[in-house]
Image (cartoon, grey):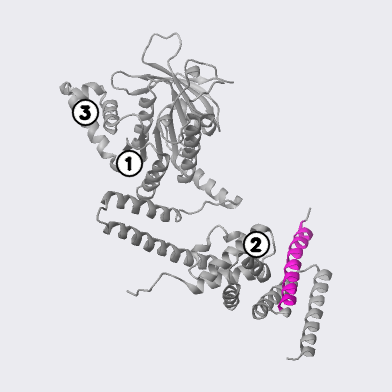
Amino acid sequence: MQYQDVPRDDEAEKAILSIILSNPDRLIEVIDLLSPLDFWIISHQQIWTAIIEVFRAGHDLDIVSIRNQLKKSEVDVQPALTALSEAFNSEALDTNLFNFIKQVQNKSRLRKIIQTISNHSTAAYLENADASKVLNGIEKDILKISDTLIESKPINAEGIIHEVNADLAQSQERGWQGYQTGFVKLDSLTGGLIPTQSWIIGAYTGIGKSFFILQILLNVLRQGGKVVLFSTEMDRKINMLRLIGNIAEVGTINLMRGSLTEGEKIRVEKAKQELSSFKDNLIIYDNVYDLAELRLKSKKIKITNGLNIIAVDFIQNLRGKESLYERMSEAAVGLQQLAQELGVTMIIGSQVSQAAAGSYNKEAIEFKGAGEIAAIADVALWLSKPKNNSDESLRQVMIRKVRHGAPGWFEVKLTFPAGKVVDMEAGKLMYG
Amino acid sequence: MDNLMIEQRFEWLFDQWVKFKQKAIETDDYTMYNFFLKQLKKQFSQLYVNLEGKPMGEFVGEIIQLASCEMRENVIKYKDDKIPF
C-alpha cells in the first residue's frame, strides 16, 4: 500500500481552474460542488474564492477580473497569478470536468476525515477525557462529512422527470408510491404515506393520538417499512408495551401487572416475537427533545440502516427557543425540511389549541403553538370524539387538509384496554 | 523584440479579429469567432501574468476584457438569432 503525506491532487485542481477559465459558462454547473477549502493549494483556494466573487458580482470571468478581485481581497497577487498561468498550461479537456471535481472532492473529504480523527484523538488523550463524549464528537463530525456524500437532487426538468418516472414505476409495481397507513379511506384520499411529505395528527389530550400513530407505524412495519419514533412524552418501554398490547389485544396496565390469562400470555409472546422480528426496522427514542439531535440521529439511521418514516410524538415537547410560537415555527419547518432532505414521510403528533379542541368547523385548524404547523402539513388529520355519540371508543378522523387530494373523514374504534385502532370504514367524502 | 515588431504583431492580431467578426456577422455563425476569442484570451492571459505591474500589462488586460465582452455579446446575439419564434 502506498502512502502520501496529505491527500491532494494538484493536477486535478489545476485542470478545474484551466477548464473554468477557458469555458466560464461552465462555472454555473459546478459552482455549488466545490468550496475554496476543497482545494489544497492556497493559491488555488484564493483563485476559486475570487472566481466565485466575480461570478456573484455579475462580471465577465477572465484573468483581469480575477486579478482585480484578488487585489480587493488583499492577497498577494503574484503567486496566485503564477498559479493561474500554470493552470492555463494544464490543457485539460473540458469533458473531464466532473471527473476532476470528483477527484478534488475525494481528496478534500479524506483530509477532513484525517483532521477529525486527529482532533478527537487529541481529546481522547486528555486526563479527564470522557469516552462517550469523544465518541459523540467523532460521530457528529463524521456525519457532517458524510452529509456531503448525499447526492444532490436534480433541479432541471429532465432530471426531475426521471425521478418522477422512477416513482411512478414503483407505484405501478407495488400499487402504492409509499406505505399505506392501513386505514382504507385515509389511504384512498391521500395516496398513502408518500416520501418527503409531512403529516400532522392533531388531537386534544386523551383522545388517542399516540395510539393512532403507533397503529400507523405498526401497519408500516408489517409492510416492511423502516420507522423511527421520537417519543417526547412516553418512555420507550411504555411505547413497546402499547405495541405488544395492540397486537396481543391486552391492556398495558395488565401487561405491567403481569395479570394475564393463559390465552393472553400466549398472545403476548407471539406479539413480542413479531415485534422482535422487526429488529432495526423499528427504533424508538425517548430522550431526544432537541431538533438538531433529532436531525443527526435520523440522518445516521438513514445512512446506516435506511429509513422510510419518522414519527414525532409530540411536537410541542421539542425544546428550543423560549416562546412557544418561535419554538413550534422552527420545529415545524425543520421537520418538514428533514423529511424532504432524507426522502422520508414525517408523521408529527400535535396538541391542538384549547379553542379549536371542540370545534367541528372545517376551517379551524389550530395546532398548538404556531400556524406553521398547519402550513407545512401535506396532510392534516384531526382526531376527536364524535358529537352526540354514546360509544366512548369511537373516534372521528377528519382529514382536514390534503395538499394533493380531497379532504374527508372516517371513523375508527379505539379498543380498550389494548389501544388497538380499528378502521370502521364508515367515512364518506365531505364535498361533492 | 523591438517596438515595431510588437506593433506589427498587434496590427496583424486586430486585422484577424476584424476578419473573424465580419465573417461571423455575414454567415451568422459565431463558432469560429468564439474559438478565436477563446484562444486569444488564453494566450493573452499568460502574457498578462508575465506583464503584471507593467504598463503594457494594462493594455493586454483591456484586450482580454474586450474579448470577454465580445463573447458575452455573441452568446446573447447567437441565442436570440436562433430562437425560431
The residue stretch that appears in magenta: B57-83
Question: Which residue is under mark 3?
Answer: A268
Q: Quadrant of the N terminus of chain A?
A: bottom left
Question: Which residue is under mark 2?
Answer: A54
Q: Chain of mark 2?
A: A
Q: From the viewer's side, name the closer residue of A134 and B32.
A: A134
Residue B62 numbered tag: none
Q: Residue A60 location, x and y as percent? A: 69, 64
Closer to viewer: mark 3 or mark 2: 2
Q: From the viewer's side, name the closer residue of A77 and A216.
A: A77
Residue type marked 1? Asn
Question: Which residue is under mark 1?
Answer: A281
Q: Upstream in the sequence, badge 1 or badge 2?
A: 2
Are both tags, 3 and 2, on one chain? yes
Residue type marked 3? Val
In this rendering, would B27 be left or right of A276?
right
